[in-house]
Image (cartoon, coloured by chain):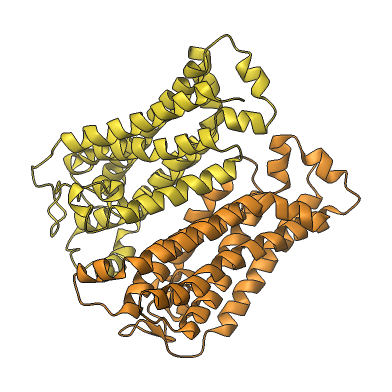
Chain colours: A yellow, B orange
Amino acid sequence: MLMLFYKAWRESKLRFLASAGLIAAMCFAYAMLSVRLYPGVAHAHPGVHGYVQYIYWTVFGGITRGMFQLSCLLLGLGGLQRDRRQHSLGFTLALPVSRARLVTSRAAVGTLQIFTLSMVPALVLPLASRIAGQYIPMTYVALFIPLWIAGGIFTFSVSFLASVLFTSEYVSLAVAYVGYIFYLAAVRHPRLSHFHLHAADFMSGLFPHYLDRTTRLWTGNYGLEPIVWFVTAGLGLMAIGAIITRRQDL
Amino acid sequence: MLWYKSLREIRTVTLFGIAAMAIACILIVLNEQTMRAHAEVPTTYVAYIWKSVYNSVGRDLFVILSIILGSGGLLQERAHGTSGFTLALPVSRRRLVFTRGVIGFCGVIAIAAVPALVTPVASRYVGEQYPLAQAAGFFALWAGCGAVFYGLTFLLAHRIEGEYISVLLAIPSLLLYGALINLPWLHHLRMLDIFDVINGDDMPFFNEAQHMLIAPLPWLTLAMMLAVSCAFLLVAARRIESVEF
């Protein structure tokens, strides 16, 4: 099993390291350039009255979160269909393990990578803020970690499922991204909006009112149920991917 | 045959992109009453279309599809083990890259044309009207900005080997460009901010109150964008000429 983990890691290593580097660089740059960028962010978002809100709109509720979501989508790609495209499927299937194990190892490595990526802002921001002469409480950034993990696993599972269904990696990426955009747009529909299904808003702490919408500070209302639901939905999609892979004629 | 080869390579993504964009536009138009009824401020139909198609879902789809279309190429073929067949064709590498580049850009144009064709027709179906001139104007803006998104990713895909790395790097590169162009001392170059030009937001040729294009389009800016995209293609071709496969 360890060798399968290593195989999955080798296949996604470059994507993961590039994603981690980019998210860390963005967090660092936003903290270090806060004096220069603050006026623009405050102009765009009227609720910005201090450094914490500035970090919220640039990292946890802004572009950096979008980058994290894209990273999750890219990390979900690969697998047996890509091996088939690269004519290396025979070698993979010749390994004395079941297809379910192959899929599980890829899903497990991806989940661990998302776990790590989710912690990057919490590790970088307090340190970079101190260097920049600013202060952001560790508790403020740490509470986003479970939300990013749950939302990240769900996002990852969307492209994971697409990678099982489509042979071309670029078609998988297009289908995963377009499917994800359609899902985000659909759950904004008035009939669905009260179910709090929007993964991006959930990761930003807006649903179900983890954060105060005016101050963007934690309200103390930190429900675990939505976190469990998003993780379960993600695992469910990955399980569907595993079932399809087992039955696929490769 | 070379054109056909390139077309086959991008066909699925392009057709999927066209279909996805058409479905998005149709769903946006069909849901206009519900969405406008639940809007925080009263919104006209034209404003609703701008916000939904040209400033939200439609634009996001277009940007990522342009980036995905630009992410293929000979370096990716090397990873698949098929670059040998392509390089064995009796044509220069430069020609291979240019053909792939031009066909990919045609894919970008095709996806950009979808809202311009679908939105006015679908609007008529729900008893509303979306001016064809507006749709045509936004098509030109999308084509110009899409050329930059596509060209940059195309260049990255021909410089860096590795799956999806060009996609992963294209987006932060564009964001960095957007952040730099918003710095105070570059503020007078607002017409080069592709993220605002693409939908007219905060631009002199766009009326923020009516959400309509009012003045002549920034043709010089769009021409510059095409020129930049061509330059990206040229650099990509030069890079591939010296790569040892």
- B95 lies left or right of B121: right
Q: Is residue A218 visible?
A: yes
What residue is rendered at 52% in x and 49% in y? A174
In the rendered image of this protein, does residue A78 appear above or below residue A128?
above
Instruction: Tell which of A30 and B215 is nearer to you.
Output: B215
What residue is rendered at 71% in x and 51% in y? B8
Q: Is residue A115 visible?
A: no
What residue is rendered at 53% in x and 42% in y? A172
Residue A205 at x, y = what percent? 21, 47
User: Image quarter for residue B75?
Assistant: top right
- A124 lies left or right of A92: left
Residue A66 at x, y = what percent? 38, 51
**Quadrant of the frame with the C terminus of chain A:** top right
Q: Residue furthest top?
A: A96
User: Image quarter for residue B92?
Assistant: bottom right
Residue B2 at x, y = what percent? 81, 55
Instruction: Tell which of A84 and B99 is nearer to you.
Output: A84
Residue A53 at x, y = what percent? 21, 57
In the rendered image of this protein, does residue A94 appear above or below residue A242?
above
Q: Residue furthest bottom?
A: B215
In the rendered image of this protein, does residue A231 appear above or below residue A92?
below
- B135 lies left or right of A215: right
Q: Residue furthest left?
A: A220
Q: How many marks?
A: 0
